[in-house]
Image (tube, rainbow, N blue to C red):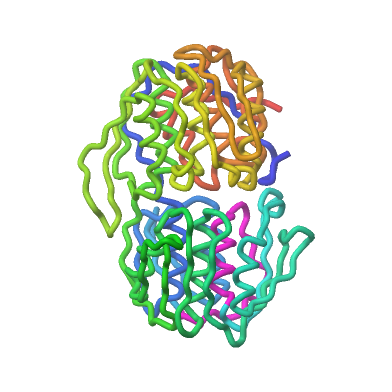
Amino acid sequence: MSGHGTPEPLRSRKAAALTGQARVPGDKSISHRSLILGAMAVGETRISGLLDGEDVLRTADAMRAFGAEVTEHGPGEWSVHGVGVGGFREPEDVIDCGNAGTGVRLIMGAMATTPITATFTGDASLRSRPMGRVTDPIALFGAQAYGRDGGRLPMTVIGAADPIPVRYHTPMPSAQVKSAVLLAGLNAPGETVVIETEPTRDHSERMLRGFGAELSVDDTDEGRVITLKGHPELKPQTIDVPRDPSSAAFPVCAALIVEGSDVLVPNIGLNPTRAGLFETLRDMGADLTYENVREEGGEPVADLRARFSPDMKGIDVPPERAASMIDEYPILSVVASFATGTTSMHGVKELRVKESDRIDAMAQGLRANGVSVNEGEDWWEVEGLGPNGVPGGATVEARLDHRIAMSFLCLGMAARDPVTVDDAAAVRTSFPIFEPLMTDLGARFERVNG
């Protein structure tokens, strides 16, 4: 059952060599933050390369509802006239965030220290996901949240009238939680402090500094300590969004497992808090190289070249790498299926509470296609079958999860028999051009009549 309307089954058949350039969309994490921080700045922020996916468009709509003027000027080209820190107005209607877990959690943080009330909802997948990880820390500022049992949407958040600064230890590695607390801290007096025991993606810290916030990061015995001074006047920026490494993962990984492939993915963000997958693939023996390494807008960027890699070996992925590749474990498990030996992934319990239970979704789908998988609460391992070793032939459930759908479509490109995804509609939330982009490289997709 689709949360996006009528299900859209899609079948992926074994492909010939994938070749060409894969110009993937803009980074989703940076796109969300560009809109939100632009709305909290004073003046006009110009954004190019914004991801035009459903998740980001929901955040754009939300910023309009809170009073910012958000305008699309052409594909990827946007402007945001902000209302300043503390300037959000009360929305006139419910904020529907669709499938955007990052969007809803960051927006809750951004409004939590302004004395307004907002109600949030989303699609079936988002309504099943826990919000307590954000509503608990924003309550420390003085905000109140009332939702369904288990801290789920729909949920009403009442912003704090007299917010107080917070010192918060994140209970799990989560860039969403850290970012929500920092955004809330913008409109609180004094200093808001977030302490991470494991570093997570640092786009929020980089962008807050870029917008003029006073923010410091210190590595201490206590952990990574991020200190933000409240009540800044954020200055509008011109932002060129790098291409999304999480989206790049799909053409890169498909090229590694499809015989004869040679694919270039240009202008990919290689922030060290996001590049764990590429490091892991190289550890496995993948023919993956960085070309034209450079820096753009404070973020490291390179062109990635991926070639068919028949000699990849299974490895134990270091648990400390999980935060830098948490969204990429599903597609990594596909690559692991075509490697030789066992690939073990530990410290990944966060995958249980993503758009779906991604450990269970991948385990069930891989088993249906002839791959052996062992799993626990916060770990899983895949028994590789080597090049051309995956039988395929099954229909798998996407579970309203874009990354599950795309991962199994990539599996079908190299499996012996076609792989069918029961509903590929969710792919539009993060990678709306996935199907034509992969087809141009040589993928073979076909619609399946219900």
Which image quarter: residue 230? bottom left
Q: Is residue 91 magenta?
A: yes
Give how far across and how far down residue 242 sits, in percent.
34, 51
The residue positioned 48% from the left and 40% from the top of the image is 319
Give how far across and how far down residue 138 sits, in percent.
60, 72
Which image quarter: residue 20? top left
Q: Quadrant of the N terminus?
A: top right
**205 lies left or right of 445:** left
Give how far across and how far down residue 403 sits, in percent.
55, 39
Which residue is the extreme one toward the right?
A: 149
**128 lies left or right of 138:** right
The residue positioned 43% from the left and 30% from the top of the image is 438
**264 lies left or right of 191:** left
Asked whether residue 428 is in view, the answer is yes
Residues rendered magenta in the picture: 83-112
The residue positioned 59% from the left and 31% from the top of the image is 380
Give how far across and how far down residue 205 sits, in percent.
39, 64
Q: Where 148 sits versus 161, above or below? A: above
Q: Quadrant of the C terminus?
A: top right
The front one of 3 and 114 is 114
Which residue is the extreme one toward the bottom?
A: 162
Which residue is the extreme one toward the front?
A: 221
Q: Where 55 sits versus 147, above or below? A: above
Q: Where 247 sits versus 84, above or below? A: above
**409 lies left or right of 1:** left
Q: Is residue 167 magenta?
A: no
The residue positioned 61% from the left and 64% from the top of the image is 134
